[in-house]
Image (cartoon, grey):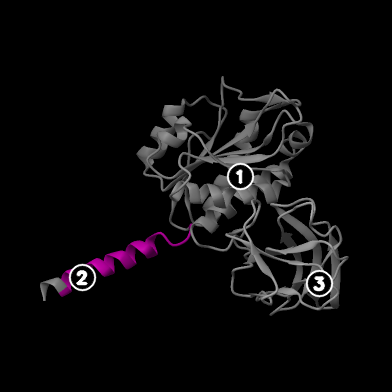
Amino acid sequence: MRKVLTFALVALFALSASYAFAGVAGQKICVDPGHGGSDPGAVGNGLQEKAINLNIGLKLRDKLSADGATPVMTRSSDVYVSLTGRCNIANNAGANRFMSTHCNAATATSANGTETFSYSSTGTGADLRNKVNPELVSHMGTTNRGVKTASFTVLTGTSMPAILGEVAFITNAGDAAKLGNDSYRNEAARAYLHGLQSHYGESPHDPGGVADIIIDNSSGGFSCSATWATGTSSGRYGADYRWRSTAAVSDPATWTPNIPVAGSWTVYAWWVAGTNRSPNSAYQIHTTSGDTNVYVNQQANGGKWNSLGSHNLGTGGAWVKKSCWATTGYVVIADAIKWHKN
Protein backbone atom coordinates (compact mmCIF):
# COMPACT_ATOMS: atom_id res chain seq x y z
CA MET A 1 0.00 0.00 0.00
CA ARG A 2 2.85 2.39 0.83
CA LYS A 3 4.44 1.74 -2.58
CA VAL A 4 1.16 2.46 -4.32
CA LEU A 5 0.71 5.69 -2.36
CA THR A 6 4.29 6.75 -3.03
CA PHE A 7 3.83 6.09 -6.75
CA ALA A 8 0.61 8.10 -6.78
CA LEU A 9 2.26 11.05 -5.05
CA VAL A 10 5.19 10.97 -7.47
CA ALA A 11 2.80 10.85 -10.44
CA LEU A 12 0.75 13.72 -9.02
CA PHE A 13 3.90 15.81 -8.49
CA ALA A 14 5.05 15.06 -12.04
CA LEU A 15 1.70 16.19 -13.45
CA SER A 16 1.77 19.34 -11.32
CA ALA A 17 5.33 20.15 -12.41
CA SER A 18 4.41 19.62 -16.05
CA TYR A 19 1.42 21.93 -15.68
CA ALA A 20 3.48 24.58 -13.90
CA PHE A 21 5.84 24.86 -16.86
CA ALA A 22 3.21 24.76 -19.60
CA GLY A 23 3.17 28.06 -21.44
CA VAL A 24 4.85 31.43 -20.97
CA ALA A 25 2.27 32.75 -18.49
CA GLY A 26 3.62 32.55 -14.94
CA GLN A 27 7.25 32.21 -16.06
CA LYS A 28 9.94 34.58 -14.80
CA ILE A 29 11.97 35.68 -17.81
CA CYS A 30 15.17 37.69 -17.49
CA VAL A 31 15.65 40.15 -20.35
CA ASP A 32 19.23 41.35 -20.80
CA PRO A 33 19.79 44.35 -23.10
CA GLY A 34 23.51 44.12 -23.78
CA HIS A 35 26.02 46.89 -22.96
CA GLY A 36 24.88 50.29 -21.58
CA GLY A 37 26.16 53.39 -19.83
CA SER A 38 29.89 53.80 -20.36
CA ASP A 39 29.88 50.72 -22.62
CA PRO A 40 28.24 51.66 -25.94
CA GLY A 41 28.81 48.27 -27.51
CA ALA A 42 29.27 48.20 -31.25
CA VAL A 43 28.81 51.36 -33.29
CA GLY A 44 28.10 51.84 -36.96
CA ASN A 45 26.01 53.75 -39.45
CA GLY A 46 25.25 56.43 -36.86
CA LEU A 47 23.90 53.91 -34.33
CA GLN A 48 25.03 52.73 -30.90
CA GLU A 49 24.33 49.13 -29.95
CA LYS A 50 23.45 49.89 -26.34
CA ALA A 51 20.46 52.03 -27.36
CA ILE A 52 19.10 49.47 -29.80
CA ASN A 53 19.48 46.64 -27.30
CA LEU A 54 17.64 48.62 -24.62
CA ASN A 55 14.78 49.55 -26.92
CA ILE A 56 14.27 45.95 -28.03
CA GLY A 57 14.55 44.76 -24.43
CA LEU A 58 11.94 47.20 -23.15
CA LYS A 59 9.55 46.23 -25.94
CA LEU A 60 10.08 42.57 -25.07
CA ARG A 61 9.49 43.35 -21.39
CA ASP A 62 6.09 44.85 -22.19
CA LYS A 63 5.11 41.94 -24.42
CA LEU A 64 6.10 39.41 -21.77
CA SER A 65 4.00 41.23 -19.18
CA ALA A 66 1.03 41.29 -21.55
CA ASP A 67 1.45 37.54 -22.10
CA GLY A 68 1.31 36.79 -18.37
CA ALA A 69 5.03 36.36 -17.70
CA THR A 70 7.07 38.21 -15.08
CA PRO A 71 9.96 40.03 -16.78
CA VAL A 72 13.20 40.69 -14.90
CA MET A 73 15.39 43.37 -16.48
CA THR A 74 19.17 43.47 -16.08
CA ARG A 75 18.86 47.15 -16.99
CA SER A 76 15.91 49.39 -17.84
CA SER A 77 17.87 52.54 -18.64
CA ASP A 78 21.21 53.63 -20.06
CA VAL A 79 23.37 52.34 -17.21
CA TYR A 80 26.42 50.11 -17.04
CA VAL A 81 25.93 46.63 -15.56
CA SER A 82 28.85 44.20 -15.44
CA LEU A 83 28.53 40.76 -17.00
CA THR A 84 28.70 39.13 -13.58
CA GLY A 85 26.12 41.63 -12.32
CA ARG A 86 23.73 40.59 -15.07
CA CYS A 87 24.11 36.95 -14.11
CA ASN A 88 23.56 37.80 -10.44
CA ILE A 89 20.34 39.67 -11.22
CA ALA A 90 18.94 36.66 -13.08
CA ASN A 91 20.15 34.11 -10.53
CA ASN A 92 18.96 36.07 -7.48
CA ALA A 93 15.55 36.58 -9.06
CA GLY A 94 15.18 32.85 -9.71
CA ALA A 95 14.47 33.46 -13.39
CA ASN A 96 13.29 30.51 -15.47
CA ARG A 97 14.96 31.68 -18.69
CA PHE A 98 17.57 34.30 -19.65
CA MET A 99 17.40 36.13 -23.00
CA SER A 100 20.17 38.55 -23.96
CA THR A 101 19.77 40.80 -27.00
CA HIS A 102 22.69 42.25 -28.94
CA CYS A 103 23.74 43.68 -32.30
CA ASN A 104 26.64 42.21 -34.24
CA ALA A 105 29.60 44.00 -35.81
CA ALA A 106 32.45 43.20 -38.18
CA THR A 107 35.34 44.94 -39.89
CA ALA A 108 33.95 43.80 -43.25
CA THR A 109 30.83 45.88 -43.80
CA SER A 110 29.45 43.16 -46.07
CA ALA A 111 28.92 40.87 -43.05
CA ASN A 112 25.23 40.65 -42.29
CA GLY A 113 22.50 38.52 -40.77
CA THR A 114 21.27 36.96 -37.56
CA GLU A 115 22.78 34.32 -35.27
CA THR A 116 21.78 33.04 -31.86
CA PHE A 117 23.96 31.43 -29.18
CA SER A 118 23.59 29.02 -26.29
CA TYR A 119 26.33 27.48 -24.17
CA SER A 120 25.62 23.89 -25.22
CA SER A 121 24.41 22.44 -28.52
CA THR A 122 21.91 20.25 -26.67
CA GLY A 123 19.48 20.69 -23.80
CA THR A 124 16.91 23.28 -22.82
CA GLY A 125 19.02 26.32 -23.64
CA ALA A 126 19.73 24.96 -27.10
CA ASP A 127 16.04 24.34 -27.65
CA LEU A 128 15.24 27.95 -26.73
CA ARG A 129 18.01 29.12 -29.08
CA ASN A 130 16.69 26.90 -31.88
CA LYS A 131 13.18 28.32 -31.46
CA VAL A 132 14.19 31.99 -31.26
CA ASN A 133 16.68 32.14 -34.14
CA PRO A 134 14.27 31.33 -37.00
CA GLU A 135 11.77 33.80 -35.56
CA LEU A 136 14.40 36.57 -35.56
CA VAL A 137 15.36 35.74 -39.15
CA SER A 138 11.71 35.71 -40.22
CA HIS A 139 10.65 38.91 -38.44
CA MET A 140 13.76 40.88 -39.38
CA GLY A 141 14.06 39.55 -42.92
CA THR A 142 17.78 38.93 -42.39
CA THR A 143 20.25 36.31 -43.57
CA ASN A 144 20.25 33.24 -41.33
CA ARG A 145 23.78 32.78 -39.94
CA GLY A 146 22.52 29.88 -37.86
CA VAL A 147 22.53 28.69 -34.27
CA LYS A 148 25.87 28.49 -32.49
CA THR A 149 27.53 27.79 -29.15
CA ALA A 150 29.77 30.09 -27.12
CA SER A 151 31.10 30.45 -23.58
CA PHE A 152 29.90 34.03 -23.08
CA THR A 153 29.73 34.97 -19.40
CA VAL A 154 25.96 35.51 -19.51
CA LEU A 155 25.55 31.97 -20.87
CA THR A 156 27.90 30.25 -18.42
CA GLY A 157 27.24 32.33 -15.30
CA THR A 158 23.45 32.01 -15.30
CA SER A 159 21.83 29.11 -13.49
CA MET A 160 18.89 28.87 -15.90
CA PRO A 161 18.74 28.08 -19.65
CA ALA A 162 20.14 31.12 -21.45
CA ILE A 163 20.55 32.46 -24.96
CA LEU A 164 22.18 35.45 -26.62
CA GLY A 165 20.76 36.76 -29.88
CA GLU A 166 22.76 38.84 -32.35
CA VAL A 167 19.79 40.43 -34.09
CA ALA A 168 21.67 41.99 -37.05
CA PHE A 169 24.93 43.73 -37.97
CA ILE A 170 25.14 47.38 -36.97
CA THR A 171 28.14 47.73 -39.32
CA ASN A 172 26.15 46.62 -42.38
CA ALA A 173 24.12 49.35 -44.07
CA GLY A 174 21.14 47.13 -44.85
CA ASP A 175 20.96 45.54 -41.41
CA ALA A 176 21.58 48.89 -39.70
CA ALA A 177 18.65 50.47 -41.55
CA LYS A 178 16.43 47.88 -39.87
CA LEU A 179 18.04 48.21 -36.44
CA GLY A 180 17.49 51.97 -36.60
CA ASN A 181 13.81 51.50 -37.47
CA ASP A 182 11.35 51.32 -34.57
CA SER A 183 9.03 48.95 -36.44
CA TYR A 184 11.86 46.46 -36.99
CA ARG A 185 12.92 46.71 -33.34
CA ASN A 186 9.35 45.86 -32.43
CA GLU A 187 9.59 42.88 -34.79
CA ALA A 188 12.75 41.75 -32.99
CA ALA A 189 10.89 41.86 -29.66
CA ARG A 190 8.00 39.91 -31.20
CA ALA A 191 10.49 37.36 -32.50
CA TYR A 192 12.00 36.77 -29.05
CA LEU A 193 8.50 36.35 -27.60
CA HIS A 194 7.30 34.02 -30.36
CA GLY A 195 10.40 31.84 -30.04
CA LEU A 196 9.90 31.68 -26.28
CA GLN A 197 6.26 30.71 -26.77
CA SER A 198 7.27 27.89 -29.13
CA HIS A 199 9.88 26.78 -26.59
CA TYR A 200 7.14 26.52 -23.96
CA GLY A 201 4.88 24.54 -26.28
CA GLU A 202 2.59 27.34 -27.41
CA SER A 203 1.74 28.53 -30.91
CA PRO A 204 3.49 31.86 -31.50
CA HIS A 205 1.09 34.72 -30.93
CA ASP A 206 0.89 38.35 -29.95
CA PRO A 207 -0.75 38.83 -26.54
CA GLY A 208 -4.48 39.33 -26.98
CA GLY A 209 -4.29 38.49 -30.67
CA VAL A 210 -4.92 35.41 -32.79
CA ALA A 211 -2.07 32.90 -32.68
CA ASP A 212 -0.01 32.23 -35.76
CA ILE A 213 -0.71 28.83 -37.30
CA ILE A 214 2.30 26.81 -38.45
CA ILE A 215 2.03 23.45 -40.19
CA ASP A 216 5.28 21.61 -40.85
CA ASN A 217 5.56 18.72 -43.27
CA SER A 218 5.53 16.32 -40.33
CA SER A 219 2.55 18.00 -38.61
CA GLY A 220 -1.09 17.04 -38.60
CA GLY A 221 -2.76 18.97 -41.39
CA PHE A 222 -0.06 18.09 -43.94
CA SER A 223 -0.50 15.46 -46.60
CA CYS A 224 1.27 14.28 -49.74
CA SER A 225 1.63 11.15 -51.83
CA ALA A 226 4.43 8.61 -51.45
CA THR A 227 6.07 10.17 -54.51
CA TRP A 228 7.30 12.99 -52.30
CA ALA A 229 10.66 12.00 -50.77
CA THR A 230 12.10 13.16 -47.44
CA GLY A 231 15.14 15.45 -47.26
CA THR A 232 17.26 16.76 -44.37
CA SER A 233 19.54 19.40 -45.91
CA SER A 234 20.43 22.39 -43.73
CA GLY A 235 18.02 25.30 -43.74
CA ARG A 236 14.95 23.14 -43.12
CA TYR A 237 12.22 24.36 -40.75
CA GLY A 238 11.89 21.24 -38.61
CA ALA A 239 13.45 17.80 -38.62
CA ASP A 240 13.05 17.33 -42.39
CA TYR A 241 11.15 18.40 -45.50
CA ARG A 242 9.51 16.81 -48.56
CA TRP A 243 10.61 17.09 -52.18
CA ARG A 244 9.77 15.66 -55.56
CA SER A 245 10.82 16.14 -59.18
CA THR A 246 8.84 18.54 -61.31
CA ALA A 247 6.39 16.97 -63.75
CA ALA A 248 3.19 17.74 -65.63
CA VAL A 249 1.03 15.81 -63.15
CA SER A 250 -1.42 16.74 -60.40
CA ASP A 251 0.37 15.52 -57.28
CA PRO A 252 0.42 18.44 -54.81
CA ALA A 253 1.58 18.52 -51.21
CA THR A 254 -1.17 20.07 -49.09
CA TRP A 255 -1.26 22.00 -45.82
CA THR A 256 -4.75 22.40 -44.27
CA PRO A 257 -5.07 24.71 -41.23
CA ASN A 258 -8.07 25.32 -39.01
CA ILE A 259 -8.58 29.07 -39.54
CA PRO A 260 -10.41 30.32 -36.41
CA VAL A 261 -11.28 33.85 -37.59
CA ALA A 262 -12.29 34.97 -41.06
CA GLY A 263 -10.48 37.95 -42.52
CA SER A 264 -7.11 39.01 -43.90
CA TRP A 265 -4.25 36.60 -43.23
CA THR A 266 -0.66 36.74 -44.47
CA VAL A 267 0.58 33.36 -45.68
CA TYR A 268 4.27 32.46 -45.46
CA ALA A 269 6.24 29.54 -46.90
CA TRP A 270 9.54 28.05 -45.74
CA TRP A 271 11.76 26.04 -48.06
CA VAL A 272 15.33 24.81 -48.42
CA ALA A 273 17.01 26.58 -51.34
CA GLY A 274 19.32 24.95 -53.87
CA THR A 275 20.51 25.27 -57.45
CA ASN A 276 18.39 22.29 -58.53
CA ARG A 277 15.16 23.85 -57.20
CA SER A 278 12.45 25.19 -59.48
CA PRO A 279 12.86 28.91 -60.19
CA ASN A 280 9.13 29.21 -60.93
CA SER A 281 7.44 27.08 -58.30
CA ALA A 282 3.72 27.56 -57.62
CA TYR A 283 1.87 27.62 -54.31
CA GLN A 284 -1.91 27.49 -54.68
CA ILE A 285 -3.80 29.32 -51.91
CA HIS A 286 -7.49 28.71 -51.24
CA THR A 287 -9.21 32.03 -50.45
CA THR A 288 -12.78 33.26 -50.03
CA SER A 289 -12.75 34.53 -53.62
CA GLY A 290 -11.28 31.37 -55.14
CA ASP A 291 -7.90 29.77 -55.60
CA THR A 292 -4.86 31.87 -56.46
CA ASN A 293 -1.37 30.84 -57.52
CA VAL A 294 1.76 32.49 -56.14
CA TYR A 295 5.02 31.70 -57.94
CA VAL A 296 8.35 31.70 -56.11
CA ASN A 297 11.99 31.02 -56.90
CA GLN A 298 13.05 28.16 -54.61
CA GLN A 299 16.67 28.53 -55.70
CA ALA A 300 16.93 31.52 -53.34
CA ASN A 301 15.69 32.80 -49.95
CA GLY A 302 15.80 29.42 -48.23
CA GLY A 303 15.87 28.86 -44.49
CA LYS A 304 13.38 31.61 -43.60
CA TRP A 305 9.73 32.60 -43.87
CA ASN A 306 8.86 34.06 -47.27
CA SER A 307 5.60 35.95 -47.71
CA LEU A 308 3.08 34.60 -50.21
CA GLY A 309 0.98 37.72 -49.72
CA SER A 310 -2.12 38.64 -47.73
CA HIS A 311 -5.37 36.90 -48.57
CA ASN A 312 -8.96 36.92 -47.34
CA LEU A 313 -9.61 33.53 -45.76
CA GLY A 314 -12.76 32.00 -44.35
CA THR A 315 -12.96 29.89 -41.22
CA GLY A 316 -11.96 26.26 -41.47
CA GLY A 317 -9.56 24.63 -43.91
CA ALA A 318 -8.06 27.37 -46.05
CA TRP A 319 -5.57 25.01 -47.64
CA VAL A 320 -2.28 25.74 -49.39
CA LYS A 321 -1.02 23.34 -52.05
CA LYS A 322 2.54 23.01 -53.35
CA SER A 323 2.36 22.12 -57.01
CA CYS A 324 5.00 20.04 -58.76
CA TRP A 325 3.66 21.13 -62.16
CA ALA A 326 6.57 23.19 -63.49
CA THR A 327 9.38 23.03 -66.02
CA THR A 328 10.95 19.58 -65.82
CA GLY A 329 14.51 19.04 -64.69
CA TYR A 330 14.09 20.58 -61.23
CA VAL A 331 12.71 19.62 -57.83
CA VAL A 332 10.19 21.44 -55.63
CA ILE A 333 10.30 21.67 -51.84
CA ALA A 334 7.40 21.29 -49.41
CA ASP A 335 8.51 22.22 -45.90
CA ALA A 336 6.33 24.48 -43.70
CA ILE A 337 3.53 27.04 -44.08
CA LYS A 338 2.58 29.81 -41.61
CA TRP A 339 -0.66 31.82 -41.43
CA HIS A 340 -0.59 35.19 -39.59
CA LYS A 341 -3.80 37.12 -38.83
CA ASN A 342 -3.44 40.71 -39.98
Residue pointed to by mark 2: 7
Q: Residue at x 60, y 47 (%)?
A: 133
Mark 3: give few (<14), some (14-19) or many (20+) Cα within 10 Å. some
Q: Amino acid at mark 2?
A: Phe
Task: Identify the residue at the far left of this view.
Answer: 1
Q: Position of residue 182 (x, y in %)?
A: 72, 41
| Marking on residue 59 | 1
Q: Amino acid at mark 3?
A: Gln
Give the label, 1 or 2, closer to the camera. 2
In the image, is 212 to the left or to the right of 6? right
Q: Position of residue 137 (x, y in %)?
A: 67, 47
Give the secondary structure at mark 2: helix
Q: Main secondary structure of the magenta part?
A: helix
Give the secondary structure at mark 1: helix
Q: Which residues are magenta?
A: 4-24
Mark 2: give few (<14), some (14-19) or many (20+) Cα within 10 Å. few
Precedes in sequence: disc 1 or disc 3: 1
| Marking on residue 185 | none
| Residue 49 figure quarter | top right
Spatial CA span between label 1 and label 2: 45 Å
| Marking on residue 284 | 3
Camera sees residue 341: no
| Residue 216 figure quarter | bottom right
Q: Residue at x 57, y 48 (%)?
A: 62
Give the secondary structure at mark 3: strand
Instruction: Count the numbered circles shown.
Output: 3
Quadrant location of the N terminus in the rendered image: bottom left
Mark 1: give few (<14), some (14-19) or many (20+) Cα within 10 Å. some
- Position above or below: 293 against 42: below
Precedes in sequence: disc 3 or disc 2: 2
Precedes in sequence: disc 1 or disc 2: 2
